[in-house]
Amino acid sequence: MINKKDITGIILAGGKSSRMGTDKGLLKLSSKPFIQYSIDALQPLVSEIIIVSDNPDYNAFGYKRIEDDIKNAGPVSGIYSGLKASLSSFNLVLSCDIPLIKTEILQELINGVDDVSEIIQIESNGKAMPLIALYKKDCENTFYRVLQSGERRLRFAVNQCKVKSILLNANAYNTTMNVNTKEELKQIENVHNN
């Protein structure tokens, strides 16, 4: 069993969301900011939480905030920057736009740790979710190489590592819903309130 002290939580809150027109992590669901849901889900499992964002508004949450090492390079740079700042071998990486995420789902990632896999990601409803995943610290070097080569696609970077997917039960699919549009925000509000 992996000890909590060996796990850091990394929340990616870097997105200048073009579709929402606002910083998604600060959107509210039941008067609680989205990022707070990610923090609450991670807290029981990790020894430290790092927020990756250039936005100083996130300092209000009281956790270590770091900026992207390589600007405008999307989640590949966010994950790289988080892993570089992390002191632990295992890192739970979450995006800040999945307010229905639960600690139990993240626990499944930890339970899936083996000697081979460098990334363990959730697969929900047929979709791989590299932004709900456990990354070994060693992925930092791979992600750095990918960034240096000018590649920005997260799927490409993830596929340079040894990946395992944990299949979610159909009844847990909604825990991984992310919000990119105002319509999706409405959907999530419906699920959350029912």
Image (cartoon, rainbow, N blue to C red):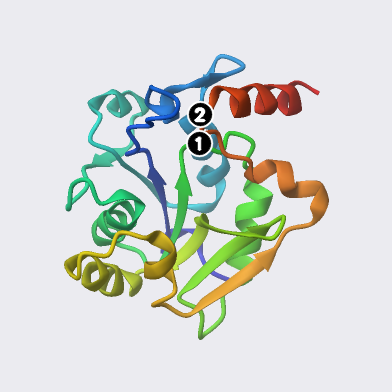
Q: Position of residue 103 (x, y in %)?
A: 63, 47
Q: Quadrant of the C terminus?
A: top right
181 relative position to 122: left or right: left
Looking at the image, is mark 2 or mark 1 nearer the viewer?
1
- Mark sitting earlier along the chain (2/1): 2
Q: Nearer the viewer, residue 83 or 131?
A: 131
The type of residue carrying mark 1 is Asp
Local SS, label 1? loop
Q: Nearer the viewer, residue 153 or 142?
A: 153
The type of residue carrying mark 2 is Phe
Local SS, label 2? helix
Specify the label residue 97 is tagged with. Answer: 1
Find disc 2 in the rendering and name its residue. Answer: 34
Quarter-wise, where is residue 182 in the image?
Answer: top right
105 relative position to 44: left or right: right
Specify the label residue 64 is tagged with. Answer: none
Q: How many marks?
A: 2
Looking at this rendering, what residue extends furthest in the bottom direction? 116
